[in-house]
Amino acid sequence: MKTSRQRLLEYIIARRIITIGELSRVLKMSEANVRHHLNEYLQLGLICEVSILKTGAKGRPARLFRPSDQLLGHNLAGLSDQLLSELRDEFSEEELHKILFGAAQRMKSEIMTGTGSLVKQTGISKSFTNKLVAVIYLLNQHSYQARWEAHTDAARLILGHCPFAAIIQKHPELCDLDQILIQELVEKPIEQTAKLVLDHDGIPHCIFRVL
């Protein structure tokens, strides 16, 4: 038997956009309970609040909710696979590297100077350690589960999750993109020393060594 929370989520998916009042009426739940479940789903990233709908000049504003893109799913892996395959067929390895380098430069520019930039969010300075901390912050905003470790010979960046895991075996050039971007941000050469190797917990991870 489905719980009230499950029925609520299914109704949001079916309707696509909904108010607290409608959920309360249709599911026969108090608005307080509806808000509680919605807040849980908001924190999990399964739904999002899209706007405020004014029910009338003197009425109270009604909150609108819809399923998140995360919940509905996407075909970004399939699209990326096709686009990268097209690039690889069309260009030489050297030309493809130039394209990836250009993409990394664009990403760096947005990270450093764009709206909500890394500089504004972390106050990145010229200190190498601060740069590493800022790069870790950035990577974790993009689901890399990154950290860094100090070693006697060189610092190491450890990526605990690959956001490209669905297509990385077919498109190892995405590792080059990661390497170029990290290298541009820390302003030091780096090399990848491990690719999706298993740690002691059996979780795959990648390691980049700062030279």
Image (tube, rainbow, N blue to C red):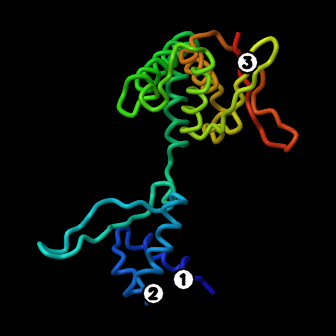
Q: What residue is at 33 percent from the left and 74 percent from the top?
A: 19
Give the vertical position of 94 relative to 12 (above or below): above
**Disc nearer the start of the sequence (1/2):** 1
Type of amino acid under label 2: Met
Q: Quadrant of residue 196?
A: top right
Q: Which residue is mark 3?
A: 155
Task: State if disc 2 and disc 1 touch (CB < 8 Å).
Answer: yes
Question: Residue 90: in sight, yes or no?
Answer: no
Q: Nearer the viewer, residue 81 or 202?
A: 202
Q: Quadrant of residue 144?
A: top right
Q: Position of residue 25 (x, y in %)?
A: 37, 87
Front label number (1 vs 3): 3
Is 199 placed left or right of 11 in the picture?
A: right
Q: Which residue is mark 2?
A: 29
The 10 Å Cα crowd at callout 2, few under 14, some 14 to 19, many 20 or more, is some
Q: Which residue is mark 1?
A: 4
Q: Position of residue 39 (x, y in %)?
A: 48, 67
Please state, as top left, top right, bottom left or bottom right, where the N terminus lies in the image.
Answer: bottom right
| SS at circle 2 | loop
Is 191 placed left or right of 124 in the picture?
A: right
